[in-house]
Structures are given as structure tokens and as C-alpha cells.
Image (cartoon, rainbow, N blue to C red):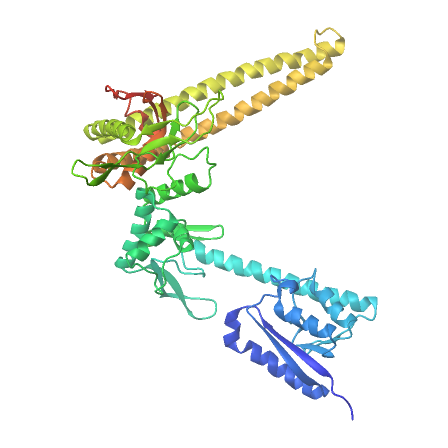
């Protein structure tokens, strides 16, 4: 009696969508019919659903690993697939996987292409060429798909992928390449939109981080569409996706669709600035608070004037007994320098009472805001814009003069070349060559700087709008500062003040950000216990 060959079958589809289109059942039926005609017995079948034979290495495919293990144990004789590309589409890998099976006494067959052999050098070449072609087809398919998706995104339409919170998909009048009615983004219900706005407000205006935001939303019963709570990862994506600012982005395609905008430009931009300041800059460069939970006004931008180390807020409560015997406590918090030793080797563990410093800083901010409220809006950013344009023009003139001077110097050096050749120059060839190279380098550097300055000046309209945006934001803060929460006041202070340095005797130096400096020119703040100087 003839013993039937034991056959293992592998069925694979690259995308899960293919599972619902009978791709695997078609492969299975063809393999069973083929095995029946050959008189083979299928003893085991493996299914790979949604596994790319091009993107996923065989080392990461559980089915291939299991089949190889079974082959090593001699549990089957033939590996059968519908087409050889079901084994993979990687020209640098799949041919050698096939060879491995054959070398381990496993015949590799395809319903469509027959048996793959490696008896001769030609067999090995054909084996490689087959997967080289399959790899090329995968690359071309990938290019076509990406180009198609990019065109969809460039037209401002939904191009696939997860739908962000705040939006939903609705059928459009467009027909896709498969003949179905295509889906498009639409802004979700107003209640959902308000949640998105709340997330951005808490992050940009009150300094909430992703973790604190998640806790806040859970505490207030706010959940995602699927009923699950927001995670830090969910919120991080919401706070970075340009879709909320009205831009459909897919790869390099980026298209503005006003109807999809939920968050205005200023709020979205500030959220990105805060994210970069908190998580991408080095700690020494960071000036925004990592958290706004503490009761202090300053965080991240207050430093010790003695050693330059960052001060941290230290909440402290002092308990005492009243005359009637009851225990009570009062807050005696402060800013503490945590550095062990200062630059001169002495210990630096100074502490400054927080309410004295916070009160002084809040007082000067209120004076600045009073000036802003009294100043005509157009004068604010108009004056600063004119100063900025004048500064650019002056730098262009200075740089142009410097380039002219360097070019004259370079001409002089080049004029010495003939004299060096004739032996009449006071320079040696080596020294003259070095001088010429140095001068050319300086000319090149100055020319690049000049091009940059001219480019910036050419964007004067954009610069004006940028100044207008900054000053409108500051004016808004001026109107709401006194009535705002401590979190908002802390974020406003961090946005306006680049650095506060506190020295012994409560001598305070304030370095304001460029965008607010023109408002503090006439502000001075002194009292008996605090001495403040504004750094200009």
C-alpha cells in the first residue's frame, strides 16, 4: 500500500479586508483540489490574516516559524501554497527560506507554479528571480497606493486611518476606485467639539499635562466615543494633530480645510510651543512649568541669583497652639535653591518666602497690564513692528558694509599672488593662501546672513501679523489676569517672563520675553522689602 505524502498548507492575505472577500477560502479550495489530484493528504493548515509578505520578515511570522519547527522534526513531506508569493515577497530573504525547506527534505509546491527545485544553478537563479519580481511588484504597489492616498489627502479628503476624537465619517458624493461611495471627515456634535476645546484650554492656558488632563476628564465623567477613558497617549495625539487646526495631513500632503477647524491658530500654536518647551528642550533651556499644581506663581523660570541654579517651590505648613489650646497651622512656603554648593565652594541652600516674591511679581505684571489696557491696540504691535523692521534694515546695511570691506581685503590678497610668484611679496605662498581662504569663508558666511535678513525683511506683512497676534494675546491676558485661576496666572507669568533671578536681600531681576519688553520700559517697582530691576 502506497503511503500518502503528508502535506502542510499555508494561506496568507496581506490585508484584513481581504479576509472578508473569500481570498483565503479560494486559496484553501485550490490547495485541497490540487492535493486530491496528486493523491496527497493535507494534515495541517496555517492561516496568516493581515500579514504582509513584503513588510514582515519571516523571522517575525509565527506561521513560518512553526512550519520550520515541524519540518525540523520531520512531521510532513510537502509544503503547499496557492502561489509562491504566499511564502513571502522579500528578495533578500524568501528565496533562502525556500532553500531551507528543500535542504531539510521538504518539497515546496505551488498550485499555480508547480514544484520549486534547486538541483542546478539555474534552479537557484529562477528561485531568486521569482522573489525579486515579487518584491518589485510589492514596491510598485506600495508606490501606487501611497500616491493615491496622497492625492486624496491633497484634495482635503479622508485618506484612511483612525478617526480622531472630535470628528466622524460621513458618506460623500465621491466614488472611490472600487466603486463605493467614499467617506469624508465632518466635525462631530457641538458637545464633542467642546470637549476638544476644553482639552486645549486646560493644556495651553492652565498648564495641564497629559496625565493631569486624563485624571481631570475621568473625574468629570468625560469619555471617548467607545466609552473608554482618555489615556495619556490619546490626549497627546489630540494635542499634536494639525487636523484640529483645519489641516488634513497624510505623509507629505498637507491641505487646509476651513470647515474642519476646531481650534483657532493662536491656541493651537501655543499648545505646540508648550509641548516643545516642556519635552524637547534641554532642562537648562526650559522656562515653562512642567506642572501648575503648586500654589506658587513662578515655576521653571525662577533662579538663584547667588549660584544660578533653578529654584523650586517648597510647600511648608507651620503648626502652632492657640491660647485656647486648639492646634492651628499657617502656610510658610518658599522658593528653595537645591544646589549643594555654589561656584565659590560654599553651600547654597537659600530659601525665599514665596508670597513676598509672588506678590512683587504679580504687582509688576498688573502695572504692565494696566499700561496695555490704556494703550490703543494698533499702537502696541505697530510700534514694535516698526522697531523690528528698522532693526532688520540696520543689520542689512551693516552686513552689506562688512561684505564690501571683506571683498576689498580679498582683492588685496589676490593681488599679492602675482608678487608671490615674482618673489616680490612680503607674504609666503602658505600664509597668503590661508589669508585668502579665511577671507572667502567670512564673505560666504556674511553673504548667507545677508540673504537671511533680506528674506526676513521680505516677509514684513507676515511679521506684522505675527506681532499683531502676540500683542492681541497679551492684551487678552491683561483683561483676564486678575480674575483667572492660579494655573492660568502661572502660565501667563511663564509666557511673559523669561527669567527671574533672586538675590540675597530679596533683590529681584526680571528678564522679560522680547514680545512684552516694549510694555515695561517705563515700569519700575520698589517698596521697603523688595527691590526689583527690569532687565532691558
Q: Is residue 47 above or below residue 400?
A: below
| Residue under the point 57% across and 77% down | 24
On screen, 145 above or below 453? Answer: below
How far across and down, in percent of the image, does residue 32 sit? 64, 84
Q: Is residue 134 above or below residue 79?
A: above
Q: Is residue 75 visible?
A: yes
Q: Position of residue 132 (x, y in %)?
A: 69, 62
Q: For this rendering, which residue is in front, 430 or 475?
A: 475
Query: Which quarter of the figure is the N terminus placed in?
Result: bottom right
The image position of residue 446, as x and y in percent, is 53, 23
Q: 523 left or right of 225?
A: left
Q: Quarter holding the C terminus? A: top left
Question: Among all residues in the image, which is located at the extreme left?
Answer: 324
Residue 257 visible in the displayed image: no
Locate residue 492: give its quadrant. Answer: top left
Question: Which is nearer the eye, 488 or 100?
Answer: 488
Q: What residue lies at 39% left-to-right and 34% top-to-bottom?
A: 287
Q: Residue at x 48, y 59 (%)?
A: 149
In the rendered view, does 105 fall on the left or right side of 357? right
Residue 338 x/y as whole percent: 42, 32
Amino acid at each position: 500500500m502506497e503511503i500518502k505524502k503528508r502535506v502542510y498548507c499555508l494561506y496568507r492575505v496581506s490585508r484584513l479586508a481581504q479576509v472578508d472577500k473569500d481570498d483565503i477560502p479560494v486559496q484553501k479550495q485550490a490547495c485541497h483540489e490540487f492535493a486530491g489530484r496528486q493523491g496527497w493528504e493535507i494534515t495541517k493548515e496555517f492561516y496568516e490574516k493581515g500579514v504582509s509578505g513584503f513588510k514582515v520578515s519571516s523571522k517575525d511570522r509565527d506561521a513560518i516559524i512553526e512550519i520550520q519547527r515541524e519540518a525540523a522534526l520531520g512531521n510532513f513531506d510537502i509544503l503547499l501554497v496557492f502561489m509562491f508569493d504566499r511564502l513571502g515577497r522579500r528578495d533578500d530573504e524568501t528565496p533562502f527560506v525556500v532553500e531551507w525547506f528543500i535542504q531539510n527534505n521538504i518539497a515546496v509546491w505551488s498550485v499555480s507554479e508547480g514544484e520549486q527545485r534547486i538541483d542546478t544553478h539555474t534552479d537557484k537563479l529562477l528561485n531568486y528571480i521569482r522573489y525579486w519580481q515579487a518584491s518589485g511588484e510589492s514596491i510598485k504597489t506600495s508606490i501606487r497606493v501611497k500616491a493615491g492616498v496622497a492625492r486624496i489627502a491633497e484634495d482635503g479628503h479622508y485618506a484612511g486611518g483612525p478617526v480622531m476624537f472630535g470628528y466622524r465619517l460621513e458618506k460623500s458624493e465621491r466614488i472611490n476606485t472600487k466603486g463605493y461611495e467614499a467617506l469624508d471627515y465632518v466635525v462631530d456634535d457641538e458637545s464633542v467639539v467642546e470637549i476638544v476645546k476644553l482639552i486645549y484650554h486646560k493644556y495651553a492656558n492652565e498648564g495641564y499635562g497629559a496625565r493631569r488632563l486624563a485624571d481631570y476628564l475621568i473625574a468629570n465623567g468625560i469619555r471617548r466615543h467607545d466609552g473608554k477613558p482618555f489615556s495619556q497617549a490619546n490626549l497627546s495625539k489630540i494635542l499634536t494633530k494639525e487636523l484640529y487646526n483645519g489641516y488634513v495631513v497624510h505623509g507629505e500632503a498637507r491641505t487646509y480645510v476651513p470647515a474642519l477647524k476646531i481650534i483657532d491658530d493662536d491656541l493651537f500654536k501655543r499648545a505646540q510651543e508648550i509641548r516643545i518647551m516642556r519635552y524637547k528642550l534641554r532642562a537648562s533651556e526650559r522656562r515653562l512649568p512642567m506642572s501648575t499644581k503648586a500654589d506658587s506663581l513662578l515655576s521653571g523660570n525662577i533662579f538663584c541669583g547667588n549660584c544660578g541654579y533653578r529654584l523650586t517651590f517648597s510647600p511648608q505648613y507651620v503648626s502652632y497652639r492657640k491660647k485656647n489650646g486648639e492646634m492651628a497651622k499657617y502656610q510658610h512656603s518658599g522658593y528653595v535653591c537645591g544646589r549643594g554648593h555654589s561656584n565659590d565652594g560654599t553651600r547654597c541652600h537659600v530659601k525665599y518666602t514665596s508670597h513676598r516674591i509672588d506678590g512683587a511679581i504679580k504687582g509688576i505684571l498688573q502695572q504692565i497690564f494696566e499700561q496695555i489696557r490704556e494703550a490703543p491696540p494698533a499702537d502696541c504691535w505697530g510700534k514694535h513692528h516698526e522697531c523690528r523692521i528698522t532693526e532688520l534694515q540696520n543689520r542689512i546695511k551693516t552686513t552689506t558694509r562688512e561684505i564690501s570691506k571683506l571683498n576689498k581685503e580679498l582683492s588685496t590678497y589676490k593681488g599679492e599672488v602675482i608678487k608671490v610668484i615674482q618673489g616680490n611679496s612680503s607674504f609666503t605662498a602658505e600664509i597668503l593662501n590661508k589669508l585668502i581662504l579665511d577671507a572667502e569663508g567670512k564673505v560666504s558666511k556674511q553673504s548667507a546672513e545677508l540673504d537671511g535678513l533680506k528674506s526676513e525683511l521680505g516677509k514684513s506683512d507676515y511679521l506684522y501679523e505675527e506681532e499683531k497676534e502676540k500683542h492681541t494675546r497679551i492684551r487678552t491676558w491683561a483683561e483676564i489676569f486678575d480674575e483667572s485661576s492660579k494655573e492660568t496666572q502661572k502660565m501667563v507669568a511663564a509666557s511673559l517672563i523669561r527669567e527671574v533671578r533672586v538675590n540675597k536681600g530679596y533683590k529681584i531681576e526680571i528678564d522679560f520675553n522680547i514680545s512684552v519688553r516694549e510694555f515695561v520700559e517705563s515700569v519700575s517697582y520698589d517698596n521697603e522689602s523688595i527691590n526689583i530691576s527690569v532687565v532691558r
